[in-house]
Amino acid sequence: MRIGILTSGGDCPGLNAVIRGIVLKGTEINGQEFVGFKGGWRGVVNSDLIELGRSNVRGIAKEGGTILGTSRTNPFEGEGGAERIQQNLEREGIDAVIAIGGEGTLAAAKRLTDAGLKIVGVPKTIDNDLDATDYTFGFDTAVQIATDAMDRLRTTGDSHSRCMVAEVMGRHVGWIALHSGMAAGAHAILIPEQKTTMEQIRSWVESANARGRAPLVVVAEGFVPGETDDAHSERGLDAFGRPRLGGIGERLAPMIEEMTGIETRATTLGHIQRGGVPSAYDRVLATRLGMAASDSVLEERWGQMVALRATDIVNVGFEEALGKLKVVPQHRYDEAALLFG
């Protein structure tokens, strides 16, 4: 069986480990052959591919990014569509596709599967917001990168008696903000799930300052202050029609400074969270998911993705994966909030 692999959407630490896991399990155990589509769904639509064998994936598990490249291409726009993609697969002798990606990628994979294509999914979202899996690879690495950055921000904040605002990723959910903020000892954590007012933020900042601390405020990019209705976005829409977020930290900093009189600076970590080598945890999880994806193709589990449940790798339908987001529950935020101020 000849299988095509693609990585789509934002890059994420651990993508190469997934590719390696698929290829090694597939070639050594399952009797499969592999090609890689270059640039995500764009490579599928344009039939732009490379051969993938054991020599191509040697040593890549520890590398960041993706050797296949990625994009946010919507496979149904332009010259795409199920019929065009099916024709490309038949011409290249490709029997099935393994799509590695997040919500947008898996939604496209579901539409193509419903149209008769043979696709298996691997969940990839640095935000850890897919409800059908307990953890997604890349999240652990992002939390560690964010925590390290905040540790550094605190030293400069202490030196100048400033309030430091650190903006991290988190479009709809605040898992990265919650975990990194708790780890770094933040005095306030602002996430999309909680409508926090500027007055409450002011109270936390002033409380920390009164104790002689330099306040650290962690905010997820999708946070919406209690006085507003929409997440901060100045960068238009992506290929799937979603707002490109970012900049809420820079918006909050002058507001905090005006309300408290404390000099406040903002830092947006942005793509730094996606870059660099994956953590040991993410390398292991990504490898296990890749191996399971090869098995899923062998077992013809079309329209399903591999997922982590407790410590086991299982299969779930695309419908379950896309049904709802895994949000930060109230009790988890309440635990963190005990440390604020």
Image (spheres, rainbow, N blue to C red):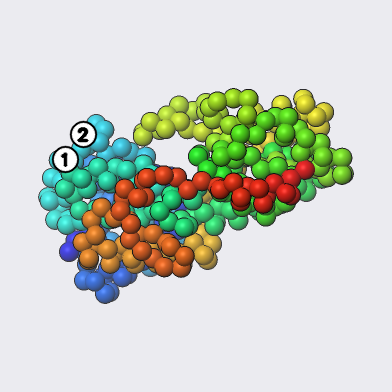
Q: Which residue is mark 2?
A: 79
Label 2 element class: loop
What residue lies at 22% left-to-right and 48% top-to-bottom? 113
Q: Are marks 1 and 2 in contact (CB under 8 Å)?
A: yes
- Residue depicted at x 64% and y 39%: 190
| Location of residue 239 in the rendering, given as x and y in whole percent from the top left corner | 36, 33
Which of the labelled discs sits on residue 84, or is there none? 1
Report which quarter residue 312 is drawn in.
bottom left
The quarter of the rendered structure image containing the N terminus is: bottom left
Percent position (x, y) of residue 247?
A: 59, 32
Left or right of 56, for residue 257 = right
Upstream in sequence: badge 1 or badge 2: 2
Residue 132 x, y percent position in the rendering: 40, 53
For disc 2, the neighbor class at 10 Å (few under 14, some 14 to 19, many from 20) is few
Disc 1 to disc 2, C-alpha distance:
8 Å
Work out which quarter of the rendered image holds the C terminus and state it. Answer: top right
Viewer-proximal residue, 177 or 60?
A: 177
- Which label was assigned to residue 316? none
Residue that sits furthest to the front in the current view? 331
Residue 272 shows in this picture: no
Q: For the residue marked with disc 2, what is the amino acid?
A: Glu
